[in-house]
Amino acid sequence: MTQPTPVAAWESDFDVLDPAYIADPFTIWDMLRTSCPIAHTERRGSTWLPTRYDDVTAIAHDIERFSSLQVAVIPFQLRPAEEGRERVLPYGLPPISADPPMHTWTRRLLLPWFSHRRVEGYEQMTRALCARMIDGFVTRGRADAAADYAQQIPVRVIAHILGVSPELADTFTGWVRDVLEFADDHERRVEGMRGLFGYLNDQIARRRHEPGDDLLSELLRTEVGGAPLDESLVLGQALLVLIAGIDTTWSAIGSSLWHLATHPEDCRRLVAEPALMALAVEELLRAYSPVTMARVVTGDMEYQGCPMKAGDKVLMNFPAANRDPEVFEDPDTVVLDRAHNRHVAFGSGIHRCAGSNLARMELRVALEEWLERIPTFRLAPEGEVTWAGGQVRGPRQLPVTFP
Ligand code: HEM
């Protein structure tokens, strides 16, 4: 793995994996919004970074000029010797990696699994899971709120929905982190993809003989135009659910707990006024939006004064849009009961998150269960908080202490 060179100028040479960007992207976005609202870099190919709400949402809706055929923030290019099994995904991970018409019908296949009614059905198991995790450390008076708690929840809920073994939670998390978080480490990323591929392929083979009432079995039963769904689409959709549902929600839970550990006045208020939880969840999602996606420019054009070329990437900086002072009053302050909050943490337009009901439920339940048992907590004075950045931002190590 090569070490990136330091950023010379954020306007023309930004790097979303730079330690300064991972630690505090907010100051960099504020600076860019006034000096150069759509920044550019040549690192990892020509890439643009919008920071204003209006630009990010306009690009998200402009699906003709900004395609979703490549959505990885750090491009994933296999070396010739590694191509082979990976070719089994000619369509990538639809619907996230598809434009219409494929986007439309592949999204429709997933949506029912994350409807309000289905998500209500997953709430009890999520609550029991959170309680079990807390049982494991509550008497110790200390925990890593990211690794011991936030990280453990979404992966088990997703395993339940897909019908795969929750015993493998740590293994899934490892693979997904290899793909998303350590994306600059080529070998590690390929290994993560191989792990996910191999496991899901085996599970698909097994479901063909012993179908259940899980998402994988349902996808195998699905027919499109009178023919069964291509197996590469079953694999792609299952992979998407695993990849999209784990790091994202884990990061949102972790960032929210970090906020409450470092802002005791907000923590006290949320404990005293539990009815605020629904609004607080939206505000925490706005302020600490974890997900940045990418688009690929379909043809040469000038966009807002920027000379974009076909094949350039544009990073859908939903997190920066949510801190835009033109749209959110006092954007860098968390206002738990913020009334006007049209945040785009779940994206905007046709690719808006298909799992947002599930993510919201998991975040709410994780915070409710934590605050019920641990109403007062703070960062461990001797511990170190570490953050992941790039495509998904959130704390990976969050040592806290409590009475
Ligand atoms: C706090 C947690 C989450 C956040 C912040 C989040 C954010 C996002 C964002 C920003 C997009 C739009 C991508 C784009 O425009 O290219 C997206 C798409 C998607 N998300 Fe989530 N997500 C979260 C949790 C989940 C969960 C739990 C699932 C379910 C497994 C999920 C499944 C999906 C799917 C399937 C798409 C693709 C939708 C499409 O292309 O039509 N997400 N998510």
Image: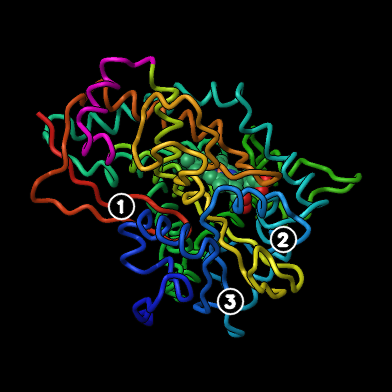
Residue under label 1, please give it.
Answer: 396
In this orientation, does residue 5 appear? yes
Which residue corresponds to the image point at 64% horizontal and 33% vertical from the top-left? 113
Circle 3 packing at 10 Å, graded few (<14), some (14-19), many (20+), is some
Q: Quadrant of residue 124?
A: top left
Please report the bounds of the magenta region as a residue range.
258-275
Figure quarter occupied by ligand 1: top right
Residue under label 3, please give it.
Answer: 46
Task: Identify the main secondary structure in magenta.
Answer: helix
Front residue (pair 394, 203): 394
Residue under label 2, please give it.
Answer: 67
The amino acid type found where label 2 is placed reads: Ser
The amino acid type found where label 1 is placed reads: Arg
Query: Which numbered disc flags the more N-terminal residue, 2 or 3?
Result: 3
Left or right: 94, with 320 as reference point: right
Q: Quadrant of residue 4?
A: bottom left
Q: CA distance from mark 2 to mark 3?
A: 15 Å
Q: CA distance from mark 2 to mark 1?
A: 31 Å
Query: Which numbered disc flags the more N-terminal residue, 2 or 1?
Result: 2
In this orientation, does residue 207 appear? no
Which residue corresponds to the image point at 67% horizontal and 72% vertical from the top-left? 308
For marks 2 and 3, give the one nearer the viewer: 3
